[in-house]
Amino acid sequence: MTSTQVDRRIEQFQNNMRLVRTEVGRVIVGNEAVIDGVMTCLLARGHVLLEGIPGVGKTKLVQTLADVLHLKFSRIQFTPDLMPGDIIGTSIVREDEGGKKYFEFQSGPIFANMVLADEINRATPKTQSALLEAMQENSVSVGKTTHPLQQPFFVLATMNPLEMEGTYPLPEAQLDRFFFKLKMGFPGVDELHEVLDRTTQAREPQVDRVLAQGEILEMRETAREVPVARPVQDYAIRLTLATHPESDGAHELAKKYVRFGASPRGTQALILGAKVHALIHDRVHVASEDVRAVTLSALRHRLLLNFEAEADRVDADAILTRIIEQVAV
Amino acid sequence: MSDREILLTALDGVERRLRVNRNLDVLTRAAIAILAAAIATVLLRALTGSHPGVFGLSLAATLFVLGCLVVAGVALLRLQARGTLEETAAEADRRGALHDTLGSALWFTRQSDTSPWIPLLLDRAARLAAALDLVRLVPVVVPRGVRVVLLLAVVLAGVSWMAPKLAAPREAVINDVTAERPEAEQIAALRRLAEAAERRGDVTARSKLAQVLAALERPDASPEDKRSALDEAHEFAEQRMLDAATDRERLRQIADQLGGRAEFGEVAQALREGDAKGAAEALKKFAAARAESADAHADVPPEGSLVPKEGADLATLQESLQSLAQNPERNLTGETQGKVAKAVQNLEEIAKRLDGAAALNQARRKLDAVSMSMSRDSRLRAGRFGQQQGAPGGTSPETGAADIKGGTMYRQAAVAKEGEGQRDGGRTGDASGNAQGDPVLGDEVKRPDVKYQLETVRSESREGPDSADAVFYSASRQGEAKTQYQLAPPQYRHAAEEAMSPERIALRHRSIVKRYFTQLREQDGK
């Protein structure tokens, strides 16, 4: 591959991103950072955890994205009685023309390119584990047969921070499987006006499918090739280590409020997310600015805070913000 | 020129400009440090004076020079330091908001990465580097510290201007002290006084002063020798002063004995004032006015030839003047003229003695100054110093020790003996402890009718004014009771009622108050 080809691929990448943003923006009002975050996860081969109060458009965003990306989409509403088989599928007994019986695997909703796991914290840990295992392995094992999942396989799990009673919060080890945790905030007045204008008319806006499966895979390849200089990589590592209370480079707030810092998977997420961010911003290399841009999304769910943080009402975002401010490039 | 060379050239230019700014900052900081040290040095010298340091420099100057050397060394090291290319690239990226393009490109130029992305990155970095406006990217900035430098320079100028004024009071103190030192000027003054004593014929005073001068000027004389000579001369001068005071007192007595006679009024007035010379002149006028012939003055020896005679002069003078006063002749006879001449001669001798005493008083002051400086030189403690230099009966301000005959009496001891000559009222006596207390109003307080026993409490300290054992009377537990048991309750009740009485007048004063108002009423009745 020559530099010209690289240049062209970068241009193609940015065009595709622009198209996706434009189409999604026809339905989703605002939340550009969330859209970029979701796209970054998709292109970095990760999965995203969306958090937001009910009604802010989490599900709508995922549905719109699936429509725009021309990907097979499925939605699983997690409930306490949801079983693993309801997600991954089950083998049923069939009878052929000769009367011979055999098992046939009926794939579950997880066999899609884009899976919306709505309110994932309402299902039992057993069911959650089935999904998370599929996210990690990109395949589903039923009986003695392993069924690979079609690529791109992208899970968007939503979590409602309210009504936590009767829910099963994801354990830290499983939270770590998510590439990003994105927060959808409440829209402002202007955005609410726009939402009402779009959704209370006779016809709701429609989106076109602008990105095929192959283009997405090509964009994934492009994102992985972005070079990272050692000083920038070193910066990402220092950011990660700053969250570890026992490390030499630990930040004061981390020492005080963090029980366990971000995992190496978090550092991977920093660099991969930074690569996509660099490409989105027309850079052929990863800058420290790109790392900073994805730090909150990549590390906020990987920090296990202690009781003191809870008592002082200090959240991971506050700690990470201070770390970003104080860790030198 | 390759992308790499373009990049390195641009970074080199950035580094040069960064170094200029860095060096300016280093020089500014060094200037701040040196100016601050200079201010401190000036203040130190002004407040403490110069003390010997190294190589003849004062201590403050030595510290200043050492500080400057340290600052210069650190500044030189920093001036020679060069930033790395990585640091330069990072700084250029930061200043130009280049998103780590130069830093990343520089890093990849040193790697053997064959990714097709690297040439693209280098190409972009080279284009950015070539387009860099170094003057705008790294402008030569006057450090903020320059304001501090200017401020410190102004402060230094001000402090330098103020320093002599700050030092003036201290130098004045030093001059005062040095003025009291036994320097040539004071010794010369003592020598002049000795010569004056010799001219007056006061051989004793001359010899004493000569001894002191010899002791002071002798190179091998120890401070004790000098102090001893000074003490001896001091005592001599004191004795002369006492003699002079006695003479003046006698003159006043003679003046009183003249009985207020008008013809001796001028003579008596001069005698009362202790002016023997004036009295002699007045007496001469008196004699001249009444002289029958100029021969009466033939017996009077010429002025200045008289040698002072101590002791009998005053008696003779008294006798002569009494005789004159008892025989108020209009015209003086030869015998009377002889008495007048004798009296004049005596008065002139007394005048010379008084003049000599006055001169010795001056000498005593000089001796005091010399003695004081010697005491300071010998680093005597303040208390001892006060004992030596304090005037008789005076009190040393530092210790309260007073110089009295027989030794030093401490201030703590200078209280009245409360049980001696003091009844009630509680006023302490004078230093000798013999003062009487205030007169007591009303009836004298009587000792309660109980039996006492004498008790002694041994003092713990063995020295000083508190060393005395305390002796007091206490109620005896043995012996016969003075108050019968049957009388004790009534007496107690009476005492308790008195104590509980709301009247504020003491029991022993009530009769006085009652009598006072009774008398007032009687006067009103009249």
Image (tube, coloured by chain):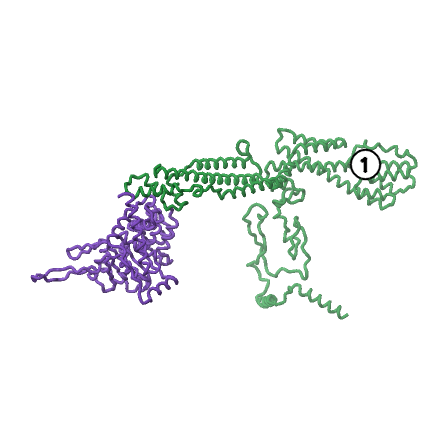
Chain colours: A purple, B green
Residue closer to the observer: B215 or A260: A260
Answer yes or no: is residue B87 visible.
Answer: no
Whether residue A177 sits left or right of residue B351 in the image: it is left
| Residue at the extreme top of the image, as rendered | B219
Residue position for label 1: B348
Image location of residue A38, percent across then percent down: 30, 55
Image location of residue B168, percent across then percent down: 62, 40
Q: Residue at x 71, y 38 (%)?
A: B238
Answer yes or no: is residue B477 visible.
Answer: yes
Residue A143, image quadrant: bottom left
- The kind of residue tagged 1 is Glu
Is disc 1 placed on a helix, strand or loop? helix
Image location of residue A20, percent across then percent down: 30, 56
Q: Residue at x 23, y 65 (%)?
A: A81
Residue B526, image quadrant: bottom right
Q: Chain of mark 1?
A: B
Whether residue B279 sits left or right of residue B386 in the image: it is right
Image location of residue A53, percent across then percent down: 33, 62
Number of marks = 1
| Residue at the extreme left of the image, as rendered | A98
Identify the image quadrant of the N terminus of chain B: top left
Residue B353, image quadrant: top right
Residue closer to the observer: A271 or B188: A271
